[in-house]
Image (cartoon, grey):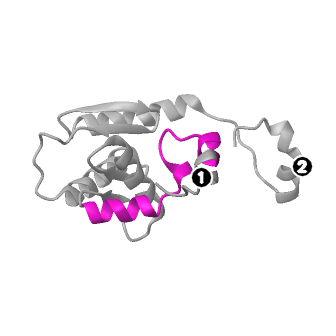
């Protein structure tokens, strides 16, 4: 990941990898359309990157956050045509943990709300320390050496 193609040409050849060039104009357009859909559905949000946004739900009472998030996910798919995953929790870091699980778990169908402490504890227990937002590879190695392996 992040290596120049010429450094992995043997792997590409050996595994028959098909290489395509990036289309940043298309990515930017899709991102803009996703963000516009989000903006039309929420009171406040902030764009974090081309493919991530944080929605502030603190002062917006929702009787069922999971149902609401599933609706937003469906709306984005309908309006833009791409699948997204949604993680909701008390902090941005926990929301990213929830999103990571939502992406990988068939049970969540792309949406996970971590709002109960027992669920948060279980999610953190199952999250490798290197997968926590802001912890880089070198710091993860140090933590692992100190026998800290999960969040």
- Work out which residue is located at the far front of the displayed protein and give it: 146
Q: Is residue 84 visible?
A: no
The mark nearer the N terminus, 2 or 1, is 2
Q: What residue is at 57 percent from the left and 30 percent from the top? A: 24
- Mark 1 = which residue? 146
134 in magenta: yes
Q: What residue is at 21 percent from the left and 32 percent from the top? A: 44
Of residue 81 and residue 55, the one placed in the foreground of this image is 55
Decide: few, some or many residues near mark 2? Use Cα within 10 Å; few <14, some 14-19, many ≥20. few
Instruction: Check disc 2 and report its element: helix, strand or loop.
Output: helix
Considering the whole magenta stretch, tell me its main secondary structure. Answer: helix
User: How many numbered tags mark residues here?
Assistant: 2
Q: Tell me: residue 38, above or below residue 126.
A: above
- Mark 2 = which residue? 10
Q: What residue is at 48 percent from the left and 58 percent from the top? A: 127
Q: Residue 18: x percent and y percent?
A: 76, 50
Decide: few, some or many residues near mark 1? Use Cα within 10 Å; few <14, some 14-19, many ≥20. few
Q: Which residues are magenta?
A: 117-141
Q: Is residue 40 visible?
A: yes
Q: CA distance from mark 2 to mark 1?
A: 36 Å
Is residue 138 left or right of 73 when viewed as pictured?
A: right
**Cβ–Cβ under 8 Å for marks 2 and 1:** no
Is residue 95 left or right of 116 when viewed as pictured?
A: right
Q: Tell me: residue 125, above or below residue 6.
A: below
Q: Quadrant of residue 42?
A: top left
Q: What residue is at 20 percent from the left and 55 percent from the top? A: 65
Instruction: Check disc 1 and report its element: helix, strand or loop.
Output: loop
């Amino acid at each position: 990941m992040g290596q120049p193609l010429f450094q992995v040409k043997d792997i590409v050849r050996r595994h028959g990898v098909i290489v395509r060039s990036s289309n940043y104009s298309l990515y930017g357009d899709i991102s803009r359309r996703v963000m516009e859909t989000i903006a039309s559905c929420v009171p406040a949000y902030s764009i974090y990157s081309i493919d991530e946004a944080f929605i502030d739900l603190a002062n917006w009472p929702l009787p069922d956050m999971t149902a609401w998030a599933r609706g937003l996910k469906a709306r984005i798919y309908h309006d833009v045509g791409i699948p997204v995953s949604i993680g909701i929790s008390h902090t941005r870091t926990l929301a990213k943990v929830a999103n990571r699980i939502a992406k990988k778990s068939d049970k969540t169908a792309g949406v996970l709300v971590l709002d109960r402490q027992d669920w948060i504890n279980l999610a953190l227990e199952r999250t490798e320390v290197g997968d926590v937002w802001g912890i880089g590879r070198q710091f993860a190695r140090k933590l692992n050496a100190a026998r800290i392996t999960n969040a």
